[in-house]
Amino acid sequence: QSALTQPASVSGSPGQSITISCTGTSSDVGGYNYVSWYQQHPGKAPKLLIYEVSNRPSGVSNRFSGSKSDNTASLTISGLQAEDEADYYCSSYSTTSTLVVFGGGTKLTVL
Amino acid sequence: EVQLVESGGGLVQPGGSLRLSCAASGFTFSSYWVTWVRQAPGKGLEWVANIKQDGSEMYYVDSVKGRFTISRDNAKNSLFLQMNSLRAEDTAVYYCARRRGSYCFDYWGQGTLVTVSS
C-alpha cells in the first residue's frame, strides 16, 4: 500500500481538462511544499512534470499545473492530447523513516 | 546533455547478491544528491536510497536497511547499489536519478531489471 493515495484511473477527451488528486498526511504532503509529479509512458523512465507543488521544469508544457490544499495535492492537465495518455505519480518529502514517498499512480486514458 | 546509464541487473537466486552501477555524464556529479528508485513489475514507484554529494550521508527505505548499500565514486562519476540477501520482493526495475534540492528527481536513467527467482 502506497503512502500517498491517488485514484487508480482517470479519463478525458481531447481538449478537456482533468485533475488527479494525491492525498497524504501532515507528515508529508500537508507539512511541506515538496510535492512533485511525474509522467511515465509504458516501458519508459519517469519524467518530472512539477516540483515544489506548482513549479514546472524547463521544457514542460504549461498545460500541466500543480496545486495543494491541506493534505491533498493536485495535478491538472488542460487541453488533453493523445500523448498525455500515461501513468502519473505524485511524490513528497516525508518526515517518516521513508524520506520520499510516492503515490500508487494514476493511469490517464485519453478517450 | 545529462545522462544516467544503469547496468548490472540480471537474474539472481533468493539470498544472492548483485551490484548495480549508474554512470553519470553531462553535469557535475559531485554537486548533487543521487538516488535509487525501483518499480516492481506492473506496480508503482518506490524510493530505495539516497546519498549525499560527498557520500557522508545515506538514507534507505526500511525494507532494504541492512541488506542494501548505496555508494558513489565522484572521481568516476558513478553511483552504486550493493544488494545482498535478495528476496523475491526485490524484483523490480531499478532507476538511478539525480535529486534536486527539493526532494524531486529531475533526471532518470533508463533502468535495469533485477529478477530474484530460483
Image: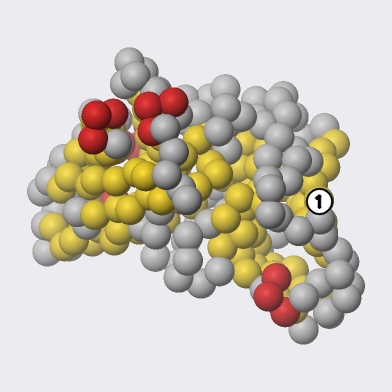
Residue A27 image-quadrant placement: top right
**Residue projecting furthest to the right:** A16
Identified by mark 1, the residue type is Ser
Indicate left or right for A96 with B78 as reference.
right
Residue A52 spot, x, y in % from top left: 71, 35
Q: Residue at x 69, y 48 (%)?
A: A58
At horizontal 12% and vertical 46% (from top left) the residue drawn is: B17
Give the percent coordinates (x, y) of residue B73: 24, 30
Residue toward you, A3 or A61 = A61
**Seen from this angle, which residue lies furthest bottom?**
A111
Is residue B50 or residue A11 the one in the foreground? Answer: B50
Q: In the rendered view, would you say A101 is above or below A16?
A: above
Q: Chain of mark 1?
A: A
For image coordinates 77% across by 35% down, the residue present is A71
Based on the displayed image, in which of its 4 quarters is residue B77 positioned?
Answer: top left
Element type at mark 1: strand
- Label 1 neighbourhood size at 10 Å, few (<14), some (14-19), many (20+)? many
From where the camera sits, is residue B89 visible?
no
> Which residue is painted at 17% across and 45% down in the image?
B19
Which residue is label 1 attached to? A65
Q: How many marks?
A: 1
Q: Is residue B18 left or right of residue A2?
A: left
Relative height, residue A69 to residue B7 (above, below): above
Q: Is residue A28 above or below residue B105?
A: above
Indicate left or right for B67 with B47 as reference: left
Horizontal and vertical percent position of residue A28? 65, 30
The residue most toward the top is B56
Image quadrant where one finds the C terminus of chain B: bottom left
Residue A7 seen from this side: yes
Q: Residue B39, percent across and down?
A: 42, 56
